[in-house]
Amino acid sequence: MEARDERGDLKRASLSRSAPWARSVVVCAINYNTAHPYSTQFDDPNRGWISRYAWSREDYHDIVLRRLRQVEEVLQQTLRSDECPRPPDLTTRCYVDTGPIVERVFAKYAGIGWIGKNTCIINQKKGSWLFLGVILTSLEFTPDLPAPDRCGTCTRCIDACPTHAILAPYQLDSNKCIAYLTIEKRGSIPEELRAGMGRHVFGCDICQDVCPWNRKASVSTERDFQPRTGLVNPALTWLAEMSAEEFRETFRGSPIRRAKRSGLRRNAAIAMGNSGNPDFLPVLEKLNADQDQSVAQSARWARDRLQKAST
Ligand code: SF4
Ligand code: SF4
C-alpha cells in the first residue's frame, strides 16, 4: 500500500506512472455474503466474531483472482475471434487488493457502487459484501457512469462504530478500527481501545451489519464462500487455547493466518474480558502465565475487568 516509485511518489496514487500502458480498468465485484446472521444478531458471551469475509476455506485473493483470469481469458478470446478481424495488441494485468490500484475508487467510477460513509463500496441491489478485483487493459473502453451516493442523511455506521473509528462521514481512522487492531496490529493493543473491541477476534462487520443497504443483501450459494466449520461465531476458549499445530491446520490457506496465532489468542483474551462472563477466569489465569507477552498482558487486563465487573 505504501510502496513508492523512484521519484518517491506513492505507486497507488497514479496509475499512469505505475502502468503507463493501461488505458482502461475493468472492475469486477463478487458477492461473498452467505446465509448466516450478522454479528449484531448474535449475543452469546462464550463466543467471538470473525469477519464474514474471512470464513471461506480459501484466501479470497485466490478465489477472486481465479475469476478475474476467466474474464481476462474471455477478453483475449474475443479479440482472437472472427468478431475482431484486426485485433489490437492487448496487455492485461489482474489485481486483487495488491498492485498500484485503490480498487474502491475505480469501482465507484466504474458504476459498481458508491463509497459509503463507512468507506465501503455499496451496490444498490447487492449491498456491500463485495470483493473487488481489477483488470488493467491496454484497450480503450467507453467508461461507465459513477454510481450516485445513496447514503443520504443516514449515520447508522458512524453511530454504531464501537471505537469511533469513523471520525466523520467518509473518513476512517484505521488505527482505531477493530479490523486493523485485530488483524494488523502486532504486540499489545492500546488499553483505551480494548473495551470497544467487544468480542471481535478477527476483523469487524458492524458498520456493514447496520447499513440499511445490507438489510436485503444478496446471498451467495457458491461453495467457495461457504464458511469453514467453527468460524461463524467461534468459541473463545477454542481460539485462546489453540496450539501452534492446530492453528496451522485450522487456518491453512485462510486469511486469518494474517493475525498470526499470537494475535488471535491476544484478541480472544480481550474478547473474554469484554464478555462479562466470569467462567473465563480460569482460562485467563492460565493465559496470564503465557510466554507471549501480548497474550499474557491482555489476559491480565481481561481478568481484572471480569473481576471488577463481578464485585
Ligand atoms: S469495521 Fe468496525 S471498528 Fe472499523 S469502522 Fe467499521 S464499525 Fe468501526
Ligand atoms: S449505514 Fe448509512 S451512512 Fe453508513 S454506509 Fe450505510 S447508508 Fe451510508
Image (cartoon, helix red, strand yellow):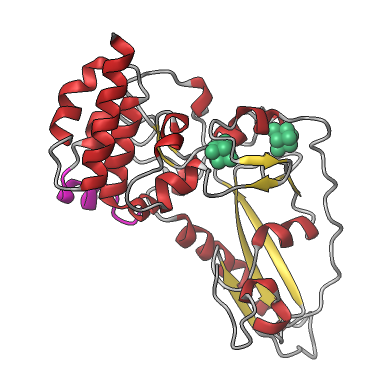
Could you say where residue 24 lies in the image, as x and y percent from the top left?
76, 74
Residue at x 71% of width, y 76% of height: 14
Where ligand 2 lies, by image quadrant? Answer: top right
Residue at x 37% of width, y 30% of height: 48
Q: Quadrant of the N terminus?
A: bottom right
**On the picture, is 211 further left or further right than 311?**
right
Could you say where residue 185 lies in the image, as x and y percent from the top left?
40, 51
Occupied quadrant, residue 149 = top right
Q: Is residue 210 above or below residue 83?
A: above
Report if residue 223 is visible in the image: no
Report if residue 25 is visible in the image: yes
Could you say where residue 218 lies in the image, as x and y percent from the top left?
63, 36
Residue at x 44% of width, y 45% of height: 181
Q: Is residue 253 above or below residue 290?
A: below
**On the picture, is 63 further left or further right than 263?**
right
- Which residues make up the magenta segment? 243-254
Nearest the viewer among 25 and 286 is 286
Could you say where residue 222 lies in the image, as x and y percent from the top left?
50, 45
Nearest the viewer among 254 and 307 is 307
